[in-house]
């Protein structure tokens, strides 16, 4: 089963690739390595606003991170000229979790994205990862994730 078929089996329809919100591009490639800019969590097409430890919980955050992963896959597909089967490996995720100083489950929130990459890409979806708690994310979003991948 190819990666597009796996997405269909999971009932995931990729959205249109987001447009940059400032002076940057959504992806940049050097050789076989593609770097995807940070994507923020969205709910109903708008920034998913919230701060962990104050007004959003870990389980809801996992859903937000999963949604970010879907957006990242759409951008990755664009970076692969529409062919996700060119993905050789998801190399690394960096997750920023908008959280209060006493919230310590950033890693669990980020699992929402990591688990989806595993479901879609299997062994090729296993990646290195960082998950940080931060005081704020652009537009008040609850999660922002960036990705590095190896492609053909």
Image (spheres, rainbow, N blue to C red):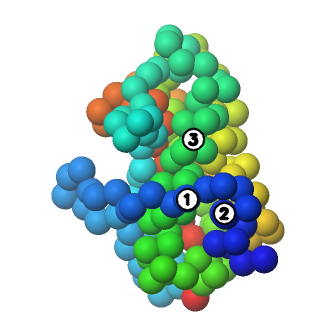
**Residue at far left of view:** 23
- Give the secondary structure at mark 2: helix
Residue 49, placed above or below residue 75: above
| Direction from residue 115 to residue 22 in the image, left or right | left
Spot occupied by residue 81 in the image (x, y as percentages of width and height): 45, 83
| Direction from residue 118 to residue 148 in the image, left or right | left
User: Which residue was labeled with disc 3?
Assistant: 65
Q: Residues within 10 Å of mark 2 (few under 14, many from 20)?
A: some
Spot occupied by residue 5 in the image (x, y as percentages of width and height): 70, 71
Cβ atoms at labels 2 and 3 below 8 Å apart: no
Q: Residue at x 48, y 55 (%)?
A: 71
Front residue of this view, candidates 103 and 70: 70
* Residue 21 badge: none
N-term-proximal mark, 2 vs 3: 2
Spot occupied by residue 100 in the image (x, y as percentages of width and height): 49, 16
N-term-proximal mark, 3 vs 1: 1
Q: Residue at x 38, y 62 (%)?
A: 17
N-term-proximal mark, 2 vs 1: 2
Q: Residues within 10 Å of mark 1 (few under 14, many from 20)?
A: few
Front residue of this view, candidates 104 and 10: 10
Q: Residue at x 46, y 20 (%)?
A: 51
Cβ atoms at labels 2 and 1 below 8 Å apart: yes
Spot occupied by residue 79 in the image (x, y as percentages of width and height): 44, 76
* Residue 7 badge: 2
Residue 93, placed above or below residue 7: above
- Mark 2–mark 1 distance (CA, rounded to whole Å): 7 Å
User: Which residue was labeled with disc 1?
Assistant: 13
Quadrant where the image shows the C terminus:
bottom right
Residue 10, placed above or below residue 34: above
């Amino acid at each position: 089963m190819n990666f597009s078929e796996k997405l269909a089996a999971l009932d995931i329809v990729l959205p249109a690739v987001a447009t940059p919100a400032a002076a940057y591009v959504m992806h940049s490639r050097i050789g076989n390595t593609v770097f995807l800019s940070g994507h923020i969590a969205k709910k109903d097409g708008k920034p998913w606003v919230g701060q962990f430890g104050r007004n959003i919980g870990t389980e809801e955050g996992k859903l937000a991170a999963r949604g970010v992963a879907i957006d990242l896959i759409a951008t990755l597909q664009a970076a692969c000229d529409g062919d996700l089967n060119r993905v050789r490996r998801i190399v690394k995720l960096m997750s920023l979790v908008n959280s209060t100083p006493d919230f310590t489950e950033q890693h669990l929130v980020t699992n929402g994205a990591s688990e989806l990459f595993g479901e879609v890409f299997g062994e090729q979806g296993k990646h290195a990862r960082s998950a940080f708690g931060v005081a704020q994310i652009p537009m008040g979003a609850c999660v922002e994730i960036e990705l590095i991948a190896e492609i053909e």
